[in-house]
Image (cartoon, rainbow, N blue to C red):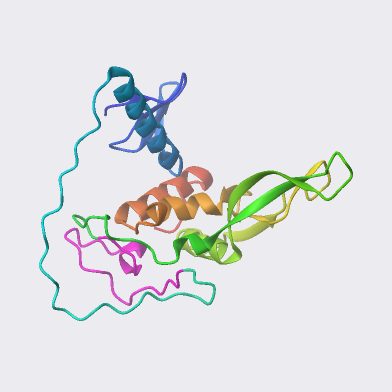
Amino acid sequence: MSYVRINSTTEYDPATRTIRQDGQTRPAGLAALAFSNVLEVQQEVRRAASGEPAPATTPSPAVAPDPSPPAAPPALTASGAPLITLRAEPAANPWNYTGPAARNPYYLAPGVSTGDAGVAGYEKWFQTANVLQASPSGGPPVVAYTMREVTEEGAQEALRLVQEYVPEAAVEATVFGGAGGPWCADKPTYSIRLPNGTRLNAAAILDSYYNRGQGVTALSDLTLRDELRWQCGWGIRT
């Protein structure tokens, strides 16, 4: 394993997606998404400090026109969000992987570039929640800051993913500041509640599983499964 230090207490191995803290290792789970961003930023900072030029890009070779008929338009819900209808059979792939991801319409087989891929309508699973605070002048509330949250449709898709392994999971909606206080959000935050009471952010689940809207892979299943095992024990569906 080749660990990279993220902060004073945490090391991360991007090859195996494991965390090492206080001499102990565990799967990074959903945290791997944030750690990968940190590593990218660290690399850019080091490159800028050393004066090293950015890596050159190789132009893509010309591609002959595809004579095949155009693909059918992606299935969307009335809101424009992805309509996920699982295949009856897993998509063919070199690993003969048959897990839930292989039946997803946005499955990416090993060796397929994600450059031209994408989950149609992906951002329609998300919305912006405004956190409001009382105006000092006594006028209407003003926006203190904004948060990226899932819609109810997005929360239901996150729940479907989790229920592949934990059928007892449920959606829970809470409103930041709803119990009183100087700040209050104008939209709910959706979480997936596990049987032991643990709550997982639905937006983080979708971003991790769908690789920020690029598509799903076998690793999508493995990362979600390992996170759920970490959060609620090993007695989950496999």
**Percent x, y for residue 215?**
34, 59
| Residue depicted at x 48% and y 52% | 205
Residue 191, quarter of the rendered image: bottom right
In the displayed structure, 224 sits above or below 163; it is above
223 vs 196, left or right, is left
Is residue 204 something that shows in the picture? Answer: yes
**Percent x, y for residue 213?**
40, 57
**Percent x, y for residue 19?**
40, 31
Q: Main secondary structure of the magenta part?
A: loop
| Residue depicted at x 84% and y 46% | 180
* Residue 141 highlighted magenta (yes or no): no
Q: Quadrant of the C terminus?
A: bottom left
In the displayed structure, 237 sits above or below 29; it is below
| Residue depicted at x 46% and y 59% | 165
77 vs 225, left or right, is right
Q: Residue furthest right?
A: 138
State which region is magenta: 82-108
**Percent x, y for residue 135?**
83, 43
